[in-house]
Amino acid sequence: MMLRADVLVVGAGPAGLAAALAASEAGGSVIVIDDNPISGGQIWRSGLSQQHDVRARRLHEKLSLAANVRILQGARIIGMLDAHLLQIETSDSTSSIYFDRLILATGARERLLPFPGWTLPGVTGAGGLQALVKGGYPIAGKRVVVAGSGPLLLATAASLRSRGAKIVLIAEQTSMRRVMRFASALRHWPGKLIQAMQLRVQSLPSRYLPSSFVLEARGKDCLQQVSLRTSKGLKLVDCDFLACGYGLLPNLELARMLGCQTVGEAVSVDRFQRSSITHIFCAGEITGIAGVDSALIQGRIAGLAATERLTDAEVLFNERDRWHSFASLLAQAFSLRPELARLCREDTIVCRCEDVCYGELMQYDNWRGAKLQTRCGMGACQGRICGTATQHLFGWTTESSRPPLSPARIESLIATKAASSLAD
Amino acid sequence: MPEMLRVIVNGKPVLVQAGTTVIAALGEGAWVTRRSVRGTERGPLCGMGICQECRVCIDGVMHRLACQTACHEGMHIETVKATP
């Protein structure tokens, strides 16, 4: 089956939805595809109509009235058939979408770093556990250690506590001085979410331990205990879950597969959110981690620019650019301490899909060599977790990405082959 | 009262709220979904469809992601615990 859209948007988080709405106002057909069961992305996870943020509810109302917008949930991109044709897969079908303009809003994931015991069941990401609990996992009564870095730790702790979890402690690797400097700088930005963040940082719970990080997770078949380095020395705590994440990273795989230029950890875009490929626009966290406010405005600009309404887009430039400095403030305040690259032992698994240990990887001096010899990065996640880890541990870069972009069924791969030989 | 669904996890019926993901259905049992290539048990990690640790068998289809699949009435879910 082949679908057609004037504008195809990938990702139904704040940036993608804002882009879809803006693009739909030009009257052409818009398709949004997203791999989760419902729209909202990670931040508006439990459904748009359920959010406190009025912007989510407004987007929901407007998009449900827009007859020219179609949102496909539970669909992921497998590969590119040609410059204007992408192949997608759902739980039970394969199809392709032909588009004139493409807007990428693939969002961010957590930076998950290896340490001894991080493969034990019960060890999750920080935002990861929050997402799993929002998906319905009953956390009431469970003891949780929240660790890692960034404002997300506080949001995660608050959200888990509201669902009945017992937060044992929150370990933030950065120093109290940096956290407080970050909190006092927040007054320069408008927005309810920022205010909430400021309130949270200023009224830190007593169990919030700055300059602290997880050394090891212990347990027989699942997590039972965590050891941490704190400013007061070594600390051992019993718990059922360790929710540990070191900030956010853009999901760049699709942009890279399509050939969009990236700089460091972000896609390069011009003032109209246009990537190095003229018919592809990018918005939100993939242009650099800056949060929901920035994502919404970038999405709107991308949607307007993709439908040739450049003057309308220009009006929004100032508002968007205010968030640039927020992004660098965030990155500075929560930059990672060097000890975090020295936690692994020789037998610590780094590539979780292929069970490749730190000791095996130490013998190589680049990603490609390690990958060919050890299978590191060749498993189901395609290096999304261990690529980040080896970049942090060894400074390796993993910049290419190839189809299939995520695990695909044989039928989809056969369809790709058939379509590409037709194109030849 | 929220609408409830009945799903089957490793042969046993489990009640979950409508609209929740397969993760919710694993709540009563252990936090374990798959076995790694070296044979150790693993559970969900990223919660957002990236890490692939939450792969389970759903309605006979292997390698579905528990964190991104919504439960439906009568769904059959098998984790690694189904085949000791």
Image: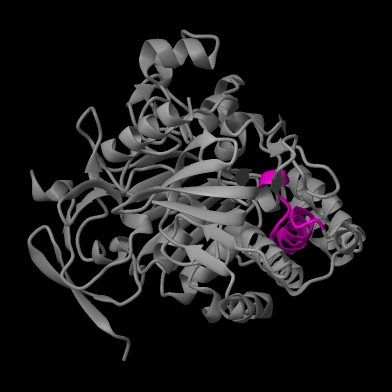
* Lateral position of residue A80 relative to residue B55, left or right: right
Magenta includes A298? yes
Magenta includes A263? no
Is A192 in front, or is A51? A51
Name the colouring of the figure: one colour
In percent of width and height, residue A184 lies at 84, 61
Main secondary-structure element of the magenta-colored stretch: helix
* Lateral position of residue A130 relative to residue A293, left or right: left
The image quadrant of residue A419 is top left
- In the rendered view, would you say A31 is above or below A103? below
In percent of width and height, residue A66 lies at 61, 76
What span is colored magenta in the figure?
A286-308
Is A90 in front, or is B43? A90
- In the rendered view, would you say A92 is above or below A278? below
The image quadrant of residue A42 is bottom right
* Residue in the picture at 44% in, 57% down: A129
* Residue in the picture at 56% in, 24% down: A398
* Lateral position of residue A353 relative to residue A321, left or right: left
Residue A343 in view of the camera: no
Residue B37 in view of the camera: yes
Is B25 in front, or is A302? A302
